[in-house]
Image (tube, rainbow, N blue to C red):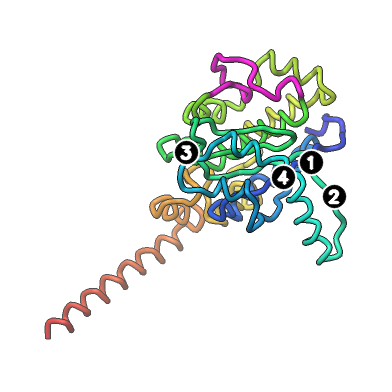
Amino acid sequence: MENIKKTTPHRVGIVLANEELDIPALKFFILSMNALQDQFEYEFLPTPDHGELFEELQKIEDVDREAVRSYVPNFLVDFPKWLEKLEDGYNLPHPRPDQWIIVSEACFSDNFYNMRENHVSVIALGNWQRSMAPPSLFEFIQTLIVRESIAGVCPALRGSVHLGTRGCICDFTAYLEDTRLKVLSGFICHSCEQALAASSRPTLATTVRYILNKKWVGNLSDPTSTTSVLAKLRYNLFLSTGLKPTFLESTINLLQTEGVKALVTLFGAVALAGLLFFFGLKSGGS
């Protein structure tokens, strides 16, 4: 990536609408993209405890996508004011992102999984299921964030531009399940690449391909790699599926990262539990 000319990054503020999404490993994975390129600069912002947009997205039942869209104007006024009060409390300046992306666990009633309105994007992941893995939910979130970022800098690609499924990041996919193809491929088709080349960021296609192919995440043999750090944060990018790993995924991850030491510890814990259970039964029968 050294040959990519430096440019002023498009700043993207990310807000997690649900506390279940507030996972250190997820934040680290997304923010790792900042060190890889200079087209986008991502930052996580706190989630407010009020506001009609967030109250709508936190509903258990299906959410009306157009209702969410109608709340955007108030969000663009109220949320920056709320942030400003927080910043004033810490004597901080008030810089604002060029674009807002809200990641939620909502289910839109029309089964779409995103909404864009006036520099605000909402990603709704409520329809995601473990059967859609691979890729992992982390990879879904990363790809969808990059897709919304592209929409923020390239007017020609703000909407979907081709019905055919090409594995392109700008594919039109009516259902979240179909999105897995573009998450897995990390591809930009010829027509979308031309649209990006005609924008003010002609090297953007190269950057997007690089961050989506995920070769940069490295492997567990390198303790400084993104993959190793994620594993230490209890998330194995190529093993875990959902927001939080299952017991089996956690066990395998522990064995891969800690090796024999972890295996001995695990068997020791199981043996101790067995002994305690045995003696408990013995004492209970006397």
Q: Is residue 8 above or below residue 162?
A: below
Q: Nearer the viewer, residue 70 or 119?
A: 70
Q: Amino acid at mark 3?
A: Trp
Magenta span of residues:
155-173
Label 4 element class = helix
Residue at left offset 75%, top offset 56% = 82
**Residue carrying label 4:** 74
Q: Nearer the viewer, mark 4 or mark 3?
A: 4
Label 3 element class = loop
Q: Main secondary structure of the magenta part?
A: loop
Q: Nearer the viewer, mark 4 or mark 1?
A: 4
Residue at left offset 47%, top offset 30% = 177
Answer with mark 4 or mark 3, whichever residue precedes in sequence: 4
**Residue carrying label 1:** 11
Is-magenta flag for residue 161? yes
Residue at left offset 43%, top offset 50% = 249
Sort mark 2 into few (<14), some (14-19) or many (20+) by Cα contacts within 10 Å: few
Q: Nearer the viewer, mark 2 or mark 4?
A: 4
